[in-house]
Amino acid sequence: MKAIQITELGGPEKLTLVDVDRPEPGAGQVLVKIEAAGLNFIDTYQRAGLYPIELPFTLGMEGGGTVAAVGPEVTGFAVGDNVAYAMTPGSYAEYNLVLAAILIKVPDGVSNRDAAAVMLQGMTAHYLAHSTFTLEPGDTCLVHAGAGGVGRLLIQMAKNIGATVFATVGTEEKAEIARECGADATILYDQVNFQEEVMRLTNGEGVEVAYDSVAKATWERSLHSLKERGMLVLYGNASGPAPAIDPLLLSTSGSLFLTRPTLGNYVSTRDALEWRAGDILKWVQDGSLKLRTEIDFPLAEAADAHRALEGRKTTGKVLIIP
Ligand code: NDP
């Protein structure tokens, strides 16, 4: 089968299309024929070495497709089932082995392609809005990169809860996308000081929570955009990781909370996984979560998908099609 592997860390040029044997499922494993793999920023961190991996490595932490074979001791899945998953590598390939324990059945009315598009970023937006900081109606929040994969979904979930959302974006076209998702105000953060703009929008009070996936370029202004006892949620590193932060800064800036969460800890039990995946797939099915999935790259062009994502050229979800 065809797969995209890296044998060395580095830039997108390290992605290589290879022929490898189709794997056989072992105990507890399911072989998934991949219809679509989701592109995520984590793929670029793994490729570049920010997040550790073992080489050679087949990229791709998210996929959707059909069950091609079932290993021993697997119950609840059969050949032909429509399935999706997140947080297992190996999705940039025609087939991938996935533990049944983290596999989710795709409900009727949702395509495998849409399921592949929403699992990782959707469950991330879900835990950010419903668990890390449990948004309530009337809360105000700041969402960076509001036209991106997680950003679009997080804006919609926050609005569905009844929160007020200020979204930062790189371009006017992206601002339009964030507004279509429900953002109450958009801020072109490359052109204006978003901290000042948030303070203006909140009559000098600040927001309850800042969801910051850009980090290095934004973390400090995000922190100073918060209300007293607000929360800074640093959940990504799109511009590079944030530096070490002195706890006293949290005290002098208003008794703030700082957290650096990761999806794995929010779907570490089957109950949590089924809750979050069940919610997002139901919301896709009933239209309360709208996806934007018009950008596809063929498997062989996965390196170009990485260039586009890192070059801030993408909006919504990018899929890689084997
Ligand atoms: P996006 O589609 O949001 O793409 C990243 C966006 O970040 C860009 O489109 C761009 O939007 C913005 N950005 C700002 N500065 C830069 C920069 N210097 N280089 C590149 N992009 C920049 O990606 P994802 O939805 O896949 O991921 C969003 C973030 O969420 C990532 O940081 C990722 O690591 C994080 N994440 C964290 C998870 C967790 O559990 N902790 C799980 C999943 C994702 P603009 O042009 O509008 O500024």
Image (cartoon, rainbow, N blue to C red):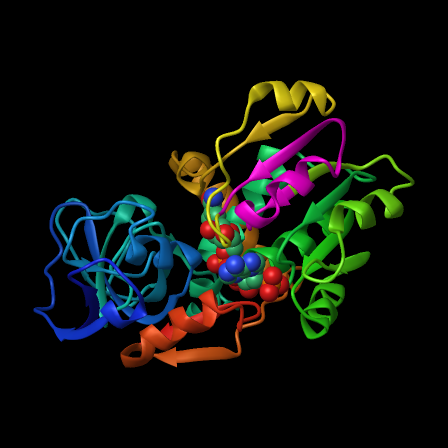
* Residue displayed at 18% across by 45% down: 28
Q: How many marks?
A: 0
* Residue displayed at 40% across by 73% down: 305
Q: Position of residue 248 (x, y in %)?
A: 61, 18
Q: Position of residue 192 (x, y in %)?
A: 76, 58
Residue 173, by quadrant, is bottom right
Of residues 151 and 311, the one drawn nearer to the viewer in this rendering? 311
Q: In this view of the protein, can residue 118 be seen by the observer?
A: no
Q: Position of residue 79 (x, y in %)?
A: 24, 64
Q: In this view of the protein, can residue 127 be seen by the observer?
A: yes
Of residues 13 and 207, the one drawn nearer to the viewer in this rendering? 13
Q: Residue 112 vs residue 34: left or right?
A: right
* Residue displayed at 18% across by 60% down: 8
Would you place residue 94 above or below residue 274 in this image? below
Q: Is residue 126 magenta?
A: no
**Residue occupying the far left of the picture:** 21
| Magenta residues, start to end | 211-236
* Residue displayed at 27% across by 48% down: 100
- Quick one: quadrant of the C terminus? bottom left
Of residues 223 and 130, the one drawn nearer to the viewer in this rendering? 223
Residue 84, by quadrant, is bottom left
Q: Residue 229 vs residue 296: left or right?
A: right
- Quick one: quadrant of the N terminus? bottom left
